[in-house]
Every structure is written in structure tokens, then in C-alpha cells.
Amino acid sequence: MTTGIRPVTDARKRPMMHPQVQTYWHEVDCGFPPVADVFEECVYEALAVFSREQMKAYLEAARVLGKLGRGPEPMLAFLEEWPSVVTAVGADVLTPVMDFVRAMQKSPNGKAIAPFLQTLAAVARRLQSAEQLQFYIDIARDLMVRTTGSIHGHHTTFPSPGLPEFFAQAPFLAKLLSMAGVKNWVEYGIRNYGNHPERQVEYFQLKSADSRAVLQRERHGTLFADVERQLDLYLRALWCDSDTLVPYSTAFDEIRKPIPYYDKLGLRVPDVFDDAQGVAGLDRYRAVLAHMIGHRRWSKPQIADNWSPFQRMAVEFFEDCRIENLLMREYPGLRRIFLALHPKPVEDACDPETTSCLRHRLAMLSRALIDPDHGYADTDLLTFAGRFHELIAAGESSTDEIATLALSYVAKTRRQSDQLAKVHFDDTVVDYRDDNRQLWRFIEEGDEEEAFDEERRLEQNKEPQGLPPRHYHEWDYQSQTYRPDWVSLYEALHPSGNPAVIDRLLAKHAALAKRLKRLLDLLKPQDKVRIRYQEDGTELDLDVAIRSLIDFKGGATPDPRINMSHRTDGRDITVMLLLDLSESLNEKIADGSQTILELSQEAVSLLAWSIEALGDPFAIAGFHSDTRHEVRYHHIKGFSEGWDDAVKGRLAAMEAGWSTRMGAALRHAGHYLSARKADKKILLLLTDGEPADIDVADPQHLRADAKKAVEELATKGVTTFCLSLDPKADEYVRDIFGNRYEVLDRIERLPEKLPMLYMALTK
Amino acid sequence: MTTDKEQYKVHKEPFYQAQGKEVVLYEAAYAARLPVMVKGPTGCGKSRFVEYMAWKLGKPLITVACNEDMTASDLVGRYLLEANGTRWLDGPLTTAARIGAICYLDEIVEARQDTTVVIHPLTDHRRTLPLDKKGELIEAHPDFQLVISYNPGYQSLMKDLKQSTKQRFTAFDFDYPEATLETQIIARETGLDEATSAKLVKIGQTARNLKGHGLDEGISTRLIVYAATLIKNGVDPKDACRMAMARPITDDSDIRATLDHAIDATFA
Ligand SMILES: Nc1ncnc2c1ncn2[C@@H]1O[C@H](COP(=O)(O)OP(=O)(O)O)[C@@H](O)[C@H]1O
Ligand SMILES: [Mg+2]
């Protein structure tokens, strides 16, 4: 290499080491020193991959890129990246790539050429086919065409603000999404931010919330959000478990790959699973859940302090295998899934002279413990597999017992080299297993005492307006007596808001309303109902007339009521809808789009609309409480009021706060309902939780009172039915409502479910 | 008018697997001629139980499957027109009262409430049945007993028994048998081996766990018997389960997928 000062302008004269490279250098006719710096190296790499023809094309393309007037970057990027592109997807893509470069050059988007070329190799490595890469270029071209142009009435055309950002994100996108997904993601950005340069940039930089949300939606594989209900059903049906499932993000956490685990808040699982080893994403979720359930059923935490990390690792592998054997006993079909997902380490893949093989040994053993056809020959492995199966043959064995076996395994197979820093990791990760944090207790750590100091809201200054309080008794299950006049209930007209809000909600659900309409028509009492046994009626009832004739001939007194007439409407149902308006309604539902309160508004609007269509008299009220001294009961719609703007206004203004003292509200609603005249009186309660109030510590107390209230109403001819939005409701809802309840698992379906439920109940 | 008692007798011992003390208790109720209500979900063995008791007590059994269109005359009887006049024909309830049979009104809530009130006078100390049309008052035969079945799991609030009707009966609360018992029932009823029967029961229970979460009722013992019968006749177990157990109870695709998975996981 030459030394000394390089004349900046004269890179063309730069001498190359190899005469052939020198010839090439002349061909590309390039004056950029940074290019000259790397040229020789690039050529060597290219020569290793390219045929002569391809070499020629490579240099020619590089030459063109050097002459675009965009500095050295495009050419640099191309020279460095192109050999990798060709390795990944073949050389034929050169034409479309250069065509696209020319298109960018002709448009105001020349600045995007370098970013395009800089990430091209990374994208190509992901896509692995020329067609896919073509698809990628088409998407980019579409983005360019539709976002380049005049903005805010300027006459000059502006380059696409999003295009360079898109190229920068492309490798990441290609990793998470199929090209169809990328297309949808780009499409969303164009449609929503086509005319908004700053927001467009943010979107394509993956900075804005919706950008990430759309990305999440488009990810390939099985998305947690799409199978959440199925997983929930799986837990309930196959494992009698109803713990909460909490997804963690895998998209934005590249370095620290999260592992499933469980804790007080629920079972933690990844937000997406690709199919793997012929196992569908859904089944991978099931494997993860089954494994964690197994721990919860059969594992007992161990004191970690006295054991070395190696010993703990061995205990974990053994214990994981024990519970998996028990799981497969329960459901033999799990074997296929576990075996497909469990790595099958090659017996002599790890060299104990140079590498720590403990992980490798344990992974093989782990395979052997769940797979009778493992085919390994190692004597220690076979001995311990035998002892393991003896232990579990008789029953479940136990964590203690299996830990002892694991420790003796470690002692028996220990090697000096286990301590080496270089660890054999290949084929040792079992990715459906959790991180086993629940298996260990550390003595040093103190128990975290959680302080349950409820903050009482100091909104006392707001004196309830309206009627004087009504007092209700409350049931004390401890003493099995009533506490007389224990609760003060204030009833007031709910404040009013804008009825148009409700009309908009109804409009939003127009399609659903249409479907409901069809069902309602079926349910609607046939316009004409026959009333038989009339002395005077509109027509002769032939059946009855013949019977009377028979009686007459037989010498008995005939029934003179041989006519019939018609009446409209045979339903005689009155319903009161009682809404829990406690604080928890302000929470957002899982996808973060709406609060439970907003969903309830939609649902109640649709229900009201449906009941109105059926013609059943109905009322709506809401309630919440702040100790027994203040249960608020909000009148929203009375039986005699129509489904009109006044009512819609109140519904629109609905707000949530405070607690859920259910019994008093039920009794109050019930007293209105029992005063009605109807065959069937239904009190329909919509709630998202169990009865609770801040002045009551014993959770049983208000449950028992609510149960009592339901029984009281039953004796007054009022049937209470509860629709619960609390996934944990199973624990108490049956206690309170007997079998008159339903738990809604997918809260986002409430608007559809509530009217349907009402129809089913009154069919 | 004489009716042949024998035709209503249960001659061959029906297979009935007791779940608890119900057999003894029923005998006691019968000895006192108390009316009996058998509550429980569909297909859990209510009818089989009554049939068995009739056999055990050696009494005739008259069963009426109730439905919405049934009128009081359908129970009590009516005049028929004949060439030379009319002829009275007893309804099943009247027949039972005359000959001293056990009258079993199956799924009574299906009948309209104004129909069911005709049974009231038979259920108290009077033990009589007035035939208004015929101008006759029947004294129930000393052996006569009234039994009704009813499924309280129905969610429809429209289908419930009047309190005044309920208050006239002693009651048995039935449910699906627990797993080992149900397995025995399936095996004995169909001749399928115990191991396969146990698997069917297990699948049945997965569905029962979903009650209230999209299923109104789980898979009944009757459906499990169907599946077992199909398997016994050579149908592939997984197909049999899908056809007899999963498909009939739900149209919800998530639930179907979960039950299908349970079937695959159980019959590996
Ligand atoms: N305890 C039992 N003993 C024997 N067979 C039973 C029992 N329980 C249920 N079965 C089976 O289930 C089927 C349905 O029972 P059935 O009595 O018709 O149900 P239900 O009257 O409760 O709807 C019966 O035909 C029988 O095969
Ligand atoms: Mg609440």
C-alpha cells in the first residue's frame, strides 16, 4: 500500500495490490477515496462468489452508482453488500434492483438510494428468494410513489419522508413479518400519514404507538392475542385451571430472550409463537402451559442456598422431566409435542477436553428421560434413566426424591472441564420449559410484606343530591342475622350528557344490530296469538268444537267456549338492568383500545335497543358505593320512560368510581321490580367483579349478603341473573347466583353478548 | 274397563349403577307414596334410575315425555267419536292412577304451567284425580306414585317449575357420576374395555369444566355411551369422540378446537 498524503480528488490513480484489481479499479472509474479504501477487499470477496459474467455486471453497476452524484455511499454500500445479496437470493435480482435505483434517482428520492442498498443484504438474507426480494422492492416502490409529491399545496415535489426510514427498518421488519405483513404495515402508514411528513417519519421509524401495534398485529406465527381464548379454554377444560395469561413482548427484546414463567400475577407466555419442528404455534403454547401447570401441581420449592449452580441446573432438568412424564401420563398426546420440541443433542457433539459439557450431558439425559427411543449409549445416562423411571413408576415421586437423584448424578458424572468458560450450548435449550424461578427459595430474602392500605377517596364534600336515603338491612353470615338499617342508599337521577354519543355507538354497531334484528324478529311474539276457549270469538275453534260435540252426543254438558280470538303479544316479561359502576370499569381491556365502561355503554345501548324492539318494559339503573353510609343508585331509565334522548343522555354520561356493595343495590332494584305486574320479572346484573367495599375486610361478608339478597328477591318473584366480566368469577359467582350466571371470557364481545344473552334467557 | 298391568311392567333388570343412597331413599319414598322429583342435567341417568326402581319395586311404569303442546287432556284423557256415539279414553296419568303404576313425567318443565297443575290433587293427601269432562273422581290406586324429572340447568328463565308445584315433591339431586363410577357405567353399558372408557370419561370432563364459559352443559353420560358404542362397533376412537361428544354440544369454534385437542391428547 502506498503511504503518505492521498490526493483527495485523485482516487482514480490509487494503485491496487493486484494487477487484476487494478484493471477493475480503472473500469469503475471512481474518484472517491473511501471507496478506494475498501475496493480491493470487496473484489476479493466478490471473486469468491461470482462468475466472470457476474463480476462484470457487478463492476458495471458499481460504476453507475458512483456516477449518480450522490457521493460515495451508494457505491460503497453496493460494493460491500452485493456479494451477500447474491449468496442469499441469486444474481438475477440485479436488474430489478438497478431499475429501482434508477427510479429513485429520477424521482426526488435519490437520497434514499444509499439506505436502500445499505440494508439490502440483511433483508435478502431474511427473505431467501428472488421472488420475495422482488416483492420487497415492489412494496418500497409503491411506498415511494404514493408518498412523494406536493404537500400542503406546494408546487415543488418533495421526497417521500418515510422511504429512507422504511429502508432502515426493513431488516427488522423482514425478520418479524411475512412480506404480506410488511405490505399491510406499509399500507397503514401510507393511508394514515401520507400527508403528514412528521408523523409519517415517526411511523416508519417504528416510533409511534400505532406503528408498533400494527406491526404486532401483522406478525407471522401464532399471535397470543388471536388464541388467548383458546388457551384459556385449554387451561380450564384440560387442567381445571383458570389462572390469568400474561403475554410478554418478544419483538423489541432482542438481546435478553425472555423465557416463560409464572408468578402471582399469572402465567407469562410470549406474545407470538412461530410454528417449529412441525408443531403449530398453538400447540407450542399448550406445551408451555402444560409444563407450568405440571410444576404447579407436582413441584415443591427447594432451598437453593446450599447447592451449587451446577447442582441446581441438574435438579431443574430432572424435575422438568419428572413433571413431563406425569403430564404425558395424564394426556398421552402431549408426548408428540414435547418430543418434537425437545432438542435431540448428538451424543459426541461436545468435546470435554476443550468445552464444558455439563449442559450437553443434561440435555441428552433430559431427552432420554422423556423419550424411550433416545438411542444414547452412555452408561451413566442409561443407569440414571433407569433409576429415574423406577422412582416414578410407582407414583408421582416428589421434587425432594428427584433432587437427590439429580445430585448423585452430578457427583457421578462430574468432570474438571465442566468448569471451563466455554460452554456447549447447541441443542441444549428446551424452549417450552419455564425458567423454574418457582422451584427455588432463597433463605436470605425476607418475605415481602405487602401493605394493603387502601386509600380512601376524600370526596366526602360532594353531598349526594336527590332523595333522602333509604335504609337497607345487610346479612351477617357470621352471626346468621340481619344488621338492620345498616346501609344508606341514595337514589338520584343520573346526570345528563350528549345523547348523540349513544346514537354514534349504535351506528358503529349497525352490522351487529342488523343481525340482532333478525333474531329479535324470531323472538317477537307472533303478532297474533290464539286465545282459545272463548264463548264469543272471531272464529270457530274446530278442535274444541268437535270435542264439545262429542260431549254433547255423549250426554255430557258441552263446553260452550268453542270460539277463539286473537290477541297481539304474548310476552309478559319485565326486566331491570342493573349496572355495576365501580372504579374497576375504568380499566382498559386487554388490547388497550377501550375501557370496560365504554364497552358497557355500547352493550347497554344495544340491549336497550333490542328490548325496546321486543316491547318488554324495562328499566336501567347503575350503582356504586363508598362504605355502607353511601351507596349511590343512579336512575338511568324508568319503566315508563321510552328509549329516548333523555335516557341516552344519561347513559352517555355514565362514569365509574368507588366500590361494589351489591346487596343493597339488588334489594333496591328488586323493590321496584317486585312492584311491577308481570309473569316474569328479571333483574339482570352486569358486573366486572365481586361484591366489595372499602369498609369490609372479609371478602365473604358481602358475597354472603348478595346471595341473601338474591334469595330475598326470589321469594318476591324476581329472578336475578348475573353477567360477570370477571374472569375470576368462578370462585364466587355460583355461590351468589346459583346457576343463574354467565362469565364472559372475551370482554370485547360484550356488545354482542349482552343482547344475545337476554334473548336466550327469555326465549 | 280393565287395563293389562303386565304390559307396563319392566321385566328385565335394567342396568343401573347407583351413585349414592338413592335406591334406598327411593324405596322409602315409595313406601310412603311420596311424590318424587329427580333433578339433574340431561343424560345423567334420571330416566334409567326411575326405570330401575320400577323394576325393583315390581310396579308398572308409565312414562310421558312432556312437551310444549301437551294439554291437560293429553294427560287425563278425552272422549273419542265413534260410529254410534262417543267413547272415553283414559290418558296416561289416569291409567296410572287406576292400575297403580308409577307415572313418570319426563322433563316436566317442557309442558306449559297450566297443564302441570292437573297433577296437584294427586300429589297431596287426597290422592285423587277429577275427570271433569266425565264427571268422575278417581281415587288413586294404593300402588300409584308420581315421579317427575327436571333439569334445573336450563338457562331460560321461562322454563322453571312453579314454586307451588315444586313444594309438592321430595327431590333427588343428580349429577354426572364421578370419573371411576362413570367409567364403570360406560364399560358395563356398552361392553367397551375399562381403559378406553376411562379416556372417554376424561374427555367428557374436559367439556364439563367449560360449563358457564361458552357451554351451557357439558357432555352427558348419554353422549359418552354413544361414543363408546361407536368404538365398540369398530369406529376409530378419535372419530367417535368428535362425532358423538364434541360436535353435538357446540358450534363455538374455539371450544370445538379445544375439545378436539383434548381428544387428540387423550387418544395419542
Ligand atoms: N347410573 C347409571 N347407570 C347406568 N346407566 C347410566 C347411568 N347414568 C347414565 N347412564 C347411561 O346414560 C344414558 C342416559 O341416561 P338417561 O337416564 O336417559 O338420562 P336422563 O334421563 O337424565 O336424561 C342411559 O341410557 C344409560 O346408558
Ligand atoms: Mg368492581
Image (cartoon, coloured by chain):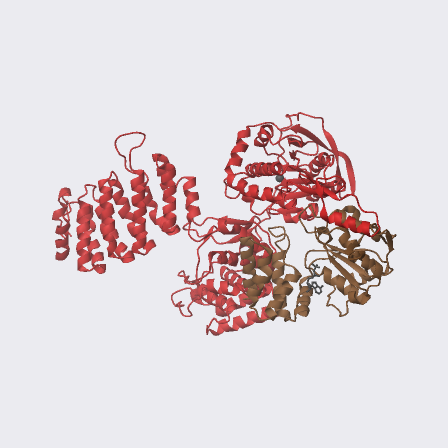
Q: Position of residue A690 (x, y in %)?
A: 65, 42
Name the colour assigned to chain B in the rendering.
brown
| Residue A459 falls in image quadrant | top right
Residue in the image at 60% along x and 71% along y: B233
Q: Position of residue A514 (x, y in %)?
A: 53, 41
Q: Position of residue B209 (x, y in %)?
A: 62, 55
The foreground one among A716 and B129 is B129
Is residue A238 in sight in this rendering? no
Q: Is residue A632 above or below residue A274?
A: above
Is residue A687 in sight in this rendering? yes
| Residue B75 falls in image quadrant | bottom right
Is residue B138 rendered to the left or right of residue A648?
Answer: right
Q: Single out the residue that lies furthest toward the front.
A: B84
User: Which quadrant does ligand 2 occupy?
Assistant: top right
The foreground one among A366 and A227 is A227
Residue in the image at 66% along x and 35% along y: A617
Residue in the image at 29% along x and 55% along y: A130
The foreground one among A703 and B243 is B243
| Residue A749 falls in image quadrant | top right
What is the number of callouts on the image? Answer: 0
User: In the rendered image, what is the letter of the chain coloured red?
Assistant: A
Q: Position of residue B131 (x, y in %)?
A: 83, 52
